[in-house]
Amino acid sequence: MAASTSNPTFSDIVTLLNTLYNNDPNIDNAPHSTLWQNTTRDDFVKIQTDSWGVPGSLVALGNPDQSNLYLALSGTSPFDGTVLPQMPDTSADPKGRHATTAELQMVANWINNSAPA
């Protein structure tokens, strides 16, 4: 991935999410499907995940540890298998893969930097 890990933009996050799910045909079974492909940065950061089974914000600006996007990609509770699996759910979406340490850092940096467009 050629994205800057220290100053990523929304397009870098979209590219990462597309890379991780890897066109797995089962993605449409997830409540979020591929919503990042058809939304703006502003709408993306406003998403609340309550209806997906985990209350809260997809992106809590400035706080990755309160952002369900980061928690899901890192496999951190509640996305550690206790409530939901780490995303992408590679058991349901076998073409997908989990984020690397560098990719997780990029997501954390994006959120810490107030999720620039």
Image (spheres, rainbow, N blue to C red):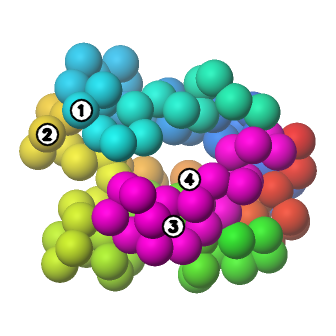
Mark 3 is surrounded, within 10 Å at the Cα level, by few (under 14), some (14 to 19) or many (20 or more) other residues, namely many
Q: Mark 1 points at which residue?
A: 29
Instruction: Tell me if residue 58 is in the magenta stretch.
Output: yes
Q: Could you tell me which secondary element the residue under label 1 belongs to?
A: helix
Percent of width and height locating residue 90: 19, 44
Residue 106 vertical placement versus 33 (above, below): below
Q: Which amino acid does label 4 sit on?
A: Glu
Farthest residue toward the front?
51
Magenta-colored span: 41-59
Rendered image quadrant of residue 57 = bottom right
Q: Which of marks 1 and 4 is nearer the N terminus?
A: 1
Q: Name the residue under label 2.
A: 92
Q: Name the residue under label 3.
A: 68
Please state which of the two labelled residues, at mark 3 or mark 1, is closer to the viewer.
1
Q: Which amino acid does label 3 sit on?
A: Asn
Rendered image quadrant of residue 96 = top left
Is label 1 in contact with label 2 (beta carbons under 8 Å)? yes
Residue 103, numbered label: 4
